[in-house]
Image: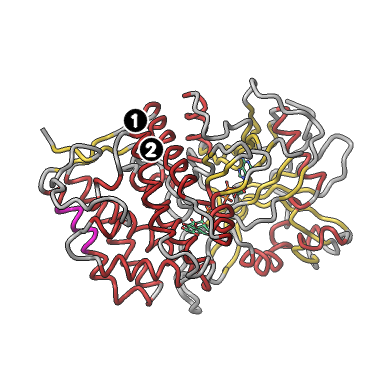
Amino acid sequence: MSEAVTRSLATPPGLLASLDPLLRQWLPRQRWFAGKGRPLTGFSLVAATELLPPGGRRGLYHLLVRAHQALAPVPGAAEQPADCYQLLIGEREALPPRLAPALIGHVTEGPLAGRTVYDALHDTRPAELLLEALRSGTRVGALRFERDPDQEIRPGLVPRLVTAEQSNSSVVYGDTFILKLLRRVVPGVNPDLELPLALAREGGDRVPAPTAWMCADLGGDPYVLGVLQPFVQGAADGWELALRELAKGEDFTAEARALGRATAEVHTALARTLPTVTLGSSQVRHLVDGMTDRLGSAAQAVPALRPYARALRSAFEALADLAAQGCTWTAQRVHGDLHLGQCLRSPGGRWWLIDFEGEPSKPLAERRMPQPPLRDVAGMLRSFDYAAHAAGHRAPGWADSCRAAYCSGYARAAGADPRTDPVLLRAYETDKAIYEVVYEARHRPDWLPVPLAAIRRLAADGGAPSPSQLSHPSLPSHPSLPACPPSPRRPRP
Ligand SMILES: Nc1ncnc2c1ncn2[C@@H]1O[C@H](COP(=O)(O)OP(=O)(O)O)[C@@H](O)[C@H]1O
Ligand SMILES: O=P(O)(O)O[C@H]1O[C@H](CO)[C@@H](O[C@H]2O[C@H](CO)[C@@H](O)[C@H](O)[C@H]2O)[C@H](O)[C@H]1O
């Protein structure tokens, strides 16, 4: 075992009880807290490890904590399965001003009574310690740090916490690496590590190859806790770039086309390296049932969706009808939550795809299932629509031309144009917009009008599918579109 981190404490007695009242206040305020809107009823410890560098100060705890919550904000409501969160807790007598944003609170009882506790990822030494553990491949308590022996990690890189809004927390080390610490963790193979590793093995150059990773082994179930990967220096993400170009009134179609090409290359590599399956009518029925169920739960959670539910369902049923007529689709591993913010453009103009975690609210097994690649395409199409809305009404037609350019870039690299499969594309776009309605209602209520506008458009189009709704006005419509175009949808022999 390496000397980087030398001590583990399995169960610091009373530690969690002393943190309980502070975590009840602090946790729901974190952007990455997944259970917003449901009262916390308590915590239970999954694993606790005290991280102690040789000769270093004590007081750094790695905790995996289950947050128990009521079903709804009603006293006495039944509990839901508790989410498990990864916390790195530091303690000090008082916090220096630079750590003020990291404050969790002042402990009044238990082993840390009188101490100030804080989110230690904001602090230099704890962040350095994590990199050192990854560099040296340490094992401490239940924690296992592993690395790709072929990639060098220089010691002494200076850490800084990424302050942008994220679903997890990331630390950049000397502009060389970025470590994403997953916040809500689940047992099993995490696609955020699995897919970039598979793509790296395949020799792809569109996704940064994982350099090191951090896991916990608990009761036979590995939990992926973090992934270190090369930092794409000087990169801007697609969302920033799109908004910048929109503000200047500049054309974004060349970038959209390049993004389509990058997406298709990643899809092709994933299909080469991981299993693909054919979806026939029973699998498509299952897919459609899932979409319909999600619509039902979303309409329960967000009443503004209810007037459109029937029309939206018909977009899903149109897909089931095609499958019942004998159409089949190829499914493969996909990104699962692709949008402009998941695409980084390096200063040389190359597009990279990041964040293969999938939609964090979905179960891991579902996120790892092979799916038609058009699911990712639909996510990107939604994203162009989001960008246009975020910019107001300054650029009429902007989203339409970006969506068309993205599809044609995709078609060039994949050999199949997503627009030749309008029923599947519309079903996925509808499913995504419904997901976004719930996401925005929970996380950014001010943004709710953006996906709701798409819901209105998609619902208005809920009858017979029409290619014109797919926003490629520059292309002729497909009046003679066959019921089962040869690719990517293929008739059964
Ligand atoms: N390899 C990378 N190089 C440069 N920046 C990155 C890299 N990976 C992630 N980032 C930055 O960190 C942000 C969050 O990363 P992401 O994987 O999307 O985390 P989350 O799942 O928490 O949203 C991204 O929006 C991007 O700005
Ligand atoms: O945090 P993640 O990147 O994993 O994804 C979640 O948050 C995204 C917002 O940050 C959210 O994306 C939605 O908003 C984007 C603009 O901020 C837009 O480009 C996307 O098209 C839209 O879906 C994403 O859905 C959510 O899973």
Q: For the point 78% across and 53% down, which residue is it?
A: 90
Q: Can you tell which quarter of the image residue 309 is in?
A: bottom left
Q: Is 457 displayed left or right of 78 in the figure? A: left
For mark 1, give the secondary structure.
loop
Q: Is residue 376 visible?
A: no
Q: Is 8 displayed left or right of 411 in the figure? A: right
- The reply to whether dot 1 and dot 2 touch (C-beta < 8 Å) is yes
Return the disc, 1 or 2, that comes first in the chain's sequence. Answer: 1
Q: How many marks?
A: 2
Q: Nearer the viewer, residue 135 or 90?
A: 135
Mark 2, other Cα within 10 Å: few <14 / some 14–19 / many ≥20 = many
Q: Nearer the viewer, residue 477 or 294?
A: 477
The residue that disc 2 covers is 333
Q: For the point 70% across and 24% down, which residue is it?
A: 152
Mark 1, other Cα within 10 Å: few <14 / some 14–19 / many ≥20 = few
- Judge whether 29 appears above or below 206 on screen: below
Q: Can you tell which quarter of the image residue 434 is in?
A: bottom left
- Image quadrant occupied by the N terminus: top right
Label 1 amino acid? Pro
The residue that disc 1 covers is 275
Q: Is mark 2 within 8 Å of ligand 2?
A: no
Q: Measured from the top left, where is residue 411 in percent x and y?
A: 34, 39
- Judge whether 130 appears above or below 167 on screen: above
Q: What range is drawn magenta here?
A: 314-321
Q: Is 113 displayed left or right of 230 in the figure? A: right
The CA span between labels 1 and 2 is 8 Å
- Image quadrant occupied by the C terminus: top left
Q: Is 76 displayed left or right of 43 in the figure? A: left
Q: For the point 47% across and 59% down, which residue is it?
A: 81
Q: Nearer the viewer, residue 462 or 138?
A: 462
Q: Measured from the top left, where is residue 70 in percent x and y?
A: 50, 70
